[in-house]
Amino acid sequence: MVRGMMDRALVGFACVYTPLPLLDAAGFVPWRILPVGDAPDQAGRLLHDNLCPHVKRLLDRAMAADLPPLAGIVFMNSCDAMRRLPDAWRVARPSDRVILVDLPASAADDAVEYFAAELRALAVNPADWGGTSIRDADLEDALRRYDGLASSAAGLRAQLARGELPGGAAALQAAINDVTAGGWPDGAARLAASSFVAPAASAAGDAARPASGVPVFVFGNVLPEPEAFALFESCGARVVADDVCTGSRVLAPLAPATDADPYVRLARGLLGRAPCARTIDPAHPGGAATRVVDAARSCGARGVVAHVAKFCDPYLARLPAIREALREAGLPLLVLEGDCTRRSLGQQRTRIEAFVEMLESR
Amino acid sequence: MIGEYFAGLARDIEAKLAAEPAASSARKVFALEVARLGVRLYSPGRPVAWCGVLAPFDLLNGVGVTSCFAEFVGAMLAGMGAATPPLEGAEQAGYAADTCAYHRAVVGAAMQGMMPVPDFLVATTTPCTGGLAAIENLARLFRRELLVLQIPRAETEAGVRFLAGQLERLARFAAGRAGTALDAERVAAAVELSNLTRGLMVEIYDLARKVPSPVGNRDLANFGIVVPLLMGTQAGVDVARATRDELAARVGDGKSGVAGERFRLLWVQNRIQFPNPLLKLLEDEYRAVIVVDELNDVTWEPIDPADPYPGMARRAIGLPLNGPAERRVARLRQLATEYRVDGVIHPCHWGCRQGTGIRGLVQRGFRETGIPVLNLEVDCIDARSFSEGQLRTRLEAFLELIAGRPRASA
Ligand code: SF4
Ligand code: SF4
């Protein structure tokens, strides 16, 4: 699973706003730390139980040493829970190199400029982590590689939406996990190769791949398990698109930007692409609701599933507006609360089946 | 309902002070100015802005906008014993009970027509993600313009420049809403008043450090979080001066805030806002006094009236609730030493990721100092889940533990 380890050191990350091209340009392989695995539940010793399970599972993995050797970990200041993670991490594993990069809450011009300054500061001394110093040309190259990766992923998503992707959403999720957990930088080629998708599909289980099903759109924060998508499909739903931070948002294309400075371009590209709930557009309060409705409509979904981690303020606070907007749009919504354990999703099977039945009867 | 409450409160205090000037106290002056602020918020006239906790209220006062952090409404409702209907309203509308009740109460109050419709809103990214989302929700419900102040995590040059630029734009925007152009002299005058209030707050907290402390458990409750709403006005100076004078007089007379002070405590983050018997228990049964609240602190330098924005930016960035846990824990430890406290009470307001996220780190940070920490599981706004018996038992056990240790102030 951990590719690239032999030649390039891994740098851990946990948020889709992480400047992956920058890590690549510094000679590292970005390695997504996913809230998966069987690490015992210990994070409560440092973080309260009433805190995001995504963050706690990552800390559990750190405390159980359930991670490959990492040259360092780059966290993004995305929300209250995420900014506490490096604090707790430093206590749990004092010898790890951990950095928190500030992340503006909007894509305003001055926010882009500030974020670019943060990225430049991050790039100052990669050698301290065993990387190489970054010339602008290296970052330009890395941005191109990232673009290639993102367009391969977009191609697969288009196939998924048309119902033509072998293995469906579960296979796509497996492929994304594989690339983000060490498959960089040759991920584009690997993502594009259908031979790559096929084994992932069979790993996810053929039985979980109905040729048809009610098209649904899934949004939320963390849902990294291919089995979760297989579960939806085994309940009669066909996931045609997602907006999940361990799913399509991971390898999403950067927003187009024409700035000459590659750091500004990267900053604008990251802040300007389809945001998750923690990022807001002050000109459109409640814009998250419109985005969900638009995304569901444009992929032809007949229903929407929200998969939200417990205690995730950014999503919990937006759900009422999203619910209202979907009701007005005539799109039924199923809200599943997750705690980043497989068990929690398995327990939802009956609700998912009932939801799909309701969609079928409409 | 809330507007009438404030108007009635202001009238009552004014009548009492007129009838019996000698009965004036710093807390009454404070309550009166808070009530007057409430009246301004609820009466048409000057433009009103609902804001995040770290908005620059002195600047907004200076440009003629009445402003307040939205959580204030949650606290007022809880204090009046009236938070349950808005909390239930918000929950019925789908706002999760796992989130901060300050925000649920205020969103519920807005949905139930209990909040004046503002002219605009100013969200702040600190202290909490939930607060940012709550202000965004209010902007959506009220269909009013939203500004977001993005507060950087560290006091870097780029960070100060970023926030200072946002503050200047906010000032221009707000002045425009108040129907004027931005007037640097008016802003400078507000900053002078703000600096005066700051200086008095430093004196107040110095007095509170004395052994025995002149403060009682209610004297400075919510002081450091509410006084900023009055900063940049003469009322802020008056409240701070009355408080300073009263505490100084007590020190001069050799009086302590709690007779026979026995234990000195540090209270982390928010007080419990609804009526409850715990403070009385501390005072009457244990002669324990909260000598310092974490939020009663001055962590910023005076601001240059001629160039206020960088100083205001540093003030917000430098707040311990912003920044890494290490800095906040270090400041808490410093307060504990300076105030010579015997124990720390951390209420861990349910739903506050800011508070609950740092709980274990605070506990750990105090372990080396030997100062015991009591973590209370409590919701500071939502009285529905308040379990007096359980809290009383935990508090009593904690105070017994402290009693068996040497006094920090000995
Ligand atoms: S799931 Fe929500 S609370 Fe957790 S890290 Fe993501 S945005 Fe933050
Ligand atoms: S109690 Fe916590 S979550 Fe609530 S307003 Fe305060 S900092 Fe934000």
Image: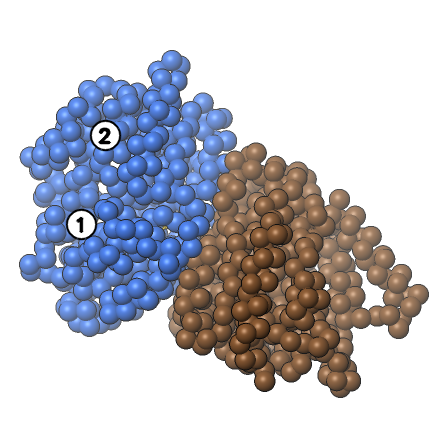
Chain colours: A blue, B brown
Residue B375, image x and y in percent?
A: 50, 60
Q: Does residue B31 appear to the left or right of A7 in the view shown?
A: right
First of labels 2, 1 by sequence position: 1
Q: CA distance from mark 2 to mark 1?
A: 20 Å
- Give B8 or B101, whichever is nearer the viewer: B101
Residue A50 to residue A286: above or below = below
Task: Work out which residue is located at the far top of the displayed protein and give it.
Answer: A361
The chain letter under disc 1 is: A
- Give A128 or B401, whichever is nearer the viewer: B401
Image quarter for residue B283?
A: bottom right
Whether residue A157 can be seen here: no
Q: Does residue B4 appear to the left or right of A16 in the view shown?
A: right
The chain letter under disc 2 is: A
Residue A168, image x and y in percent?
A: 20, 29
Counting every numbered tag in the picture gives 2
- Judging by the rendered image, the residue that carries numbered circle 2 is A230
SS label for mark 2: helix
Q: Residues within 10 Å of mark 1 (few under 14, many from 20)?
A: many
- Judging by the rendered image, the residue that carries numbered circle 1 is A181
Instruction: Report if the beta carbon of the residue with label 1 is closer than 8 angstroms to ligand 1.
Output: no
Q: Residue at x 31, y 59 (%)?
A: A75
Q: Residue at x 30, y 41 (%)?
A: A341
Q: Are marks 2 and 1 on the same chain?
A: yes
Q: Residue at x 70, y 71 (%)?
A: B216
Label 2 sits on what residue type? Ala
Mark 2 or 1: the one toward you: 2
Q: Residue at x 78, y 50 (%)?
A: B5
Q: Are marks 2 and 1 in contact (CB under 8 Å)?
A: no
- Give B295 or A245, whichever is nearer the viewer: B295
